[in-house]
Image (spheres, grey):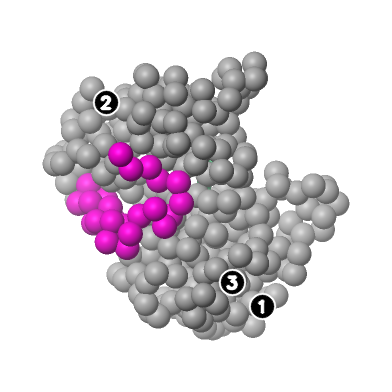
Amino acid sequence: MKHLIDPTDLSVEEIDSILNLALDIIENKEKYSEVCKGKKLATLFFEPSTRTRLSFEAAMMELGGNVLGFSSADSSSATKGESVGDTIRVVGCYADIIAMRHPKEGAPMLGSMVSPVPIINAGDGGHNHPTQTLTDLLTIKREKGDLNNFTIGLCGDLKFGRTVHSLIKALSRYEGIKFILISPKELKVPDYIITEVFEKNNIDYREVTTMEEVMPELDIIYMTRVQKERFFNEADYVRLKDTYILDKSKLKNAKETLSIMHPLPRVNEISTELDDDPRAAYFRQALNGKFVRMALILTLLGVNV
Ligand code: CP
């Protein structure tokens, strides 16, 4: 039995196979509409979500399966003191696969150690968000046609932004990717990403503090929200939250072929004036999340179509 806790739990070949399955689902939706009949997905969200939870649920429904679960810790027996391990053991009696989001780093890993069914990490604290990474990879594949040889600027809260950490880990295994890390000094990527991912694998990266200085080089700009919920101090959040706002003026020197991505939700990081720009890929990205989660569910359940 396989779980998905960290993006590197999947080999490059396994990722490519999930992305190709997602592309086939997009082209042949009818073929997949009953393949999970009789199967149940549990979504255990101890932390708020719109895209991840609802796209997981829509994914299972479009595969002909059923969903159960909760959307906040408050409506679960966690409020009575039940441990993550016990919750997972019990829900594993009711569901065939579990997608779990938790504010504590490592909680889905803990759950996977006692789970009778596959566990999917749907985001753990500021650590990882591997299904957002699959969403991002499918988006890059569809927008750019390739997962190799491009320059990506990751902009915003690179310290607490779990989507960025997971995406860096996944993309670092492809060829010819240049990473430009755009953040204020307080929100730089954690040291372990620099040493364990970039330096260990001899990957081309640099850190800058403005998007203007690198905009002409970028094939993709990946904007992120400053993660209010991870700050210890409200004043620091208020000071940093609007450091980067992408608007028409900032794109003056950008490539015509630039792709603008954002895992969403956005607050102010991308002006709505860009929403109709053909380079704005973030709503297409959200849709890709449903298809890639359909492919992941099929893969982890071992359903062959
Ligand atoms: N991208 C993402 O994880 O969004 P939600 O928090 O709404 O699930």
User: What stretch of residues is rendered in magenta?
Assistant: 1-26
Q: CA distance from mark 1 to mark 2?
A: 48 Å
The image's mark for residue 216 is: none
What is the three-letter code of the residue carrying label 1? Answer: Val
| Nearest to N terminus: mark 3 or mark 1 | 3
Q: Residues within 10 Å of mark 2 (few under 14, many from 20)?
A: some
Residue occupying image coordinates x 79% and y 47%: 232
| Nearest to N terminus: mark 2 or mark 3 | 2
In the rendered image, the vertical position of residue 163 relative to residue 91, given as above or below: below
| Nearest to N terminus: mark 1 or mark 2 | 2
Q: Which residue is mark 1?
A: 208
Foreground mark, 1 or 2, reads 2
Q: Which residue is mark 3?
A: 195
Q: Is residue 113 visible to the viewer in this orientation of the structure?
A: yes
Disc 2, disc 3: CB below 8 Å? no
Q: Residue furthest front?
A: 113
